[in-house]
Each structure stands twice: as C-alpha cells, then as structure tokens.
Image (cartoon, rainbow, N blue to C red):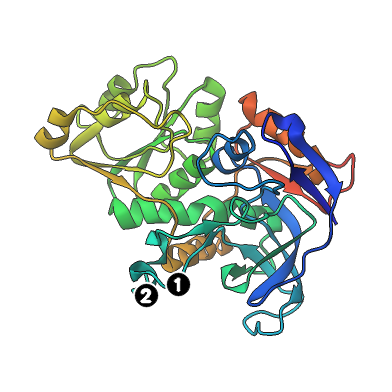
Amino acid sequence: MRAVVLRDFGGPEVLDLEEVPDPTPEAGEVVVKVHAVTVNRTLDLKVRENGTARGVTLPHVLGVDPAGVVVALSGDVRSVEMGARVAVLPHIRCGQCEFCTMGREELCPRSRHIGVHRWGGYAEYVSVPAKNLVPLPDELPFADAAVILRHAPTAFNLLRGLAGLRAGEWVLVMGATGGLGAAGMQVAKLLGATVIAGAGATARVDSALANGADHGVDYRTDDLAEEVERLTGGRGVDVVFENISDPALWPKAFASLAHSGRLVTAGAHGGGTVELDVRRLYGRRLRIIGGAGASKPDIASALDAAAQGKLRAVIDRIMPLHAAADAHRLFEKEVVLGKVVLDPTMARGDAG
C-alpha cells in the first residue's frame, strides 16, 4: 500500500510517500480502507516536528481520525462486518483502570492514540481495534465524518459535560475557525447559547460569523476583554471555550468571564504556559476545567446531530494523500479556514 511515512523528525519535507506492506489485523482488530483523514495541528504537525513528549517511535505514519470501509477482520471480531462504513475513534482505552471499569473511558490515564502510539491513517489502509469503530450512516460523507467525530464529541464533553452550559448563556469561543473551535461554536449554538467567536484575523471572524456565530472579535486588533464586556452589556460570558493557551490571549479570555463563569480547555498549541490572576479566580468564583476526549454519549450526540443536519463539517479543502507535506505547509502559513482532509483514494491532480 501507499503511506506517508515519517522516518525523521523535521519540517513538512520529511513526509515521504512510500510503498509499505499492507497491514494485517491482529486479534480484535480490523483493517480499514481509508477514504478520509484530517490534518491536525497538535497531533500531526507537532508530532512531525518532535514537539511533543508522546513517545513516538520512528518510522511512523500520522493520522489520528481515519474514516473508510472495513476490508479485513481478525477471526475473533464479531462486532462489524466486511464492507461497513466506519469512522475510527483515536483513543485506545485500556479497559482495566478504575475509570474504564466505571464507564468513564474518557478519563483513562493509560489511553493510547492511533496515529501517535501506533500507525495511523495517512495511508491507503490502517489496522485498528474493532472497539474503536463507529458505524456511519450512508448519507454522511467520509470527509465530514472524520472532521465531525474528531472534534464535536470533545466539544460536547467540554461544553455540556464539564461546563454545564445551559440555554440562554453566553459563550466565548477562542480560535473559532480551527477544528475544535468550529465544533465548539456549533455545539454551543445547539445547546441554546449566544456565541462570541474569537479569531485572529478579519477573514477568520467573517468565516465564524458565516458559520453561525452571533458576534465576532478579532483578538489580534481589538481588546478582547473590552469587546466582550461591550457585547454582553458589561456582564461577561458564562463560559470561555479556550483551546489555544496563547500567553498573550489567555489572560484576556479569562478576564472575559462573568461572575461564577467557567473556562474549559483541551488544547495548548499556542504555548501552554499562561499567567493566572488567582485573586480574580477566587474573588469572582470562577472555575477552570481541563478535559480531553469524549464519552460514548458525547459521540452519539455528535453523530445524531450530524445525521440531522444540525452539525456541519467545516472543511477548507480535501487533498490527495501524496500532498500531505503541502497540507502541513498550509497550516504553517495560517491560510486555512476549517479542516484540511487527506483522501488516499483521490488521484493525483484532483482536489476538493
């Protein structure tokens, strides 16, 4: 099969398309013919650069969220049939820790990651645990499924589960045109909130407004906290959906919270170390909640909403597998509005 193989850490140029042996499913596994896999800033670009401490072993194949068709099964798999349309959930839970045994798999401390700890979906085929498969409705395109299931379940977990977002509340979504930001914006609207989209350029603010935000703020040119105060009549927002952790922006986002507000986060690509005003934290009864991943109900909610047309995949473009390095360069140039998807079935010269 063809796969984009990472043999050295470095820039996009280290992503080489190679011929490698087809995968064979081990016990409990299936092989999926990949029709779509998204490009992710943290779990693809940072891993490629060796910018994480996730224990990646070379040679490696990136791609955490493939979607496609089941083409091979190990003999012990009964939960899925050949030819099934599926998406692959990225986290491989241990199934044995205290959290897994109580049904809170999203909290598993031993979780491993497809596309990080084992080969992922930047390939024509990928072998994955059968328990990680999600059946897809026929009407949901593979690219849409990969994008929606990558981020929308996490957004449901953060906003509904951890922040307890209620209808009528105000939400500030930082990085509103990124993958998780776009999902958070849509989930917040589904839950009945008023959404302020924070983004780092006028074009990004316009894109967020076109995708359903009620208000927009360019936090590179405007004072974020002042704009939020103005938009909310001096009150502030009930929830900040903050997945950037930019040292310059985080204090402004935190200062945008109303009394008893909640800040939820599952990302740190902007730096990860920020300044915290502790007096404001306890004085205004604020909460900061970290959480990654999603529960089975979160996954079901995302799929149901997508099937009903209430969640849409925000896709900048679809590119063939051999263009993986170019896809990474687009992210580095900050020119994408939405997700970039790789399609290994796409012929050279095609683009979507």
Return the residue found at the far top: 221
Residue 229 location, quadrant? top left
Whether residue 335 is visible here, answered yes or no, is: no
Labels 1 & 2 near each other (Cβ < 8 A):
yes
Which residue sits at x=71%, y=74%? 84
Which residue sits at x=59%, y=36%? 50
Q: Position of residue 301 (x, y in %)?
A: 46, 64
Q: Position of residue 136 (x, y in %)?
A: 64, 68
Q: Nearer the viewer, residue 161 or 63?
A: 63
- Could you tell me the amino acid type at mark 1? Gly
- Could you tell me the amino acid type at mark 2? Thr
Which residue sits at x=60%, y=44%? 314
Whether residue 25 is visible here, answered yes or no, is: yes
The quadrant the N terminus occupies is bottom right
Answer with left or right where residue 46 lies relative to residue 27.
Answer: left
Label 1 vs 2, first from the N-terminus: 1
Q: Pointer 1: what residue?
A: 95
Return the residue found at the far left: 283
Label 2 packing within 10 angstroms: few (<14), some (14-19), many (20+): few
Answer with left or right where residue 228 lies relative to residue 190.
Answer: left
Q: Position of residue 81 (x, y in %)?
A: 71, 80
Q: CA distance from mark 1 to mark 2?
A: 7 Å
Residue 17 location, quadrant? top right
Q: Position of residue 51 (x, y in %)?
A: 55, 34
Answer with left or right where residue 182 lies relative to residue 282.
Answer: right
Numbered badge on residue 156: none
Considering only vertical position in the picture, is 8 above or below 66? Answer: above
The quadrant the C terminus occupies is top right
Return the residue found at the far right: 348
Which residue sits at x=41%, y=55%? 156
Q: Nearer the viewer, residue 230 or 276?
A: 276
Q: Pointer 2: what residue?
A: 101
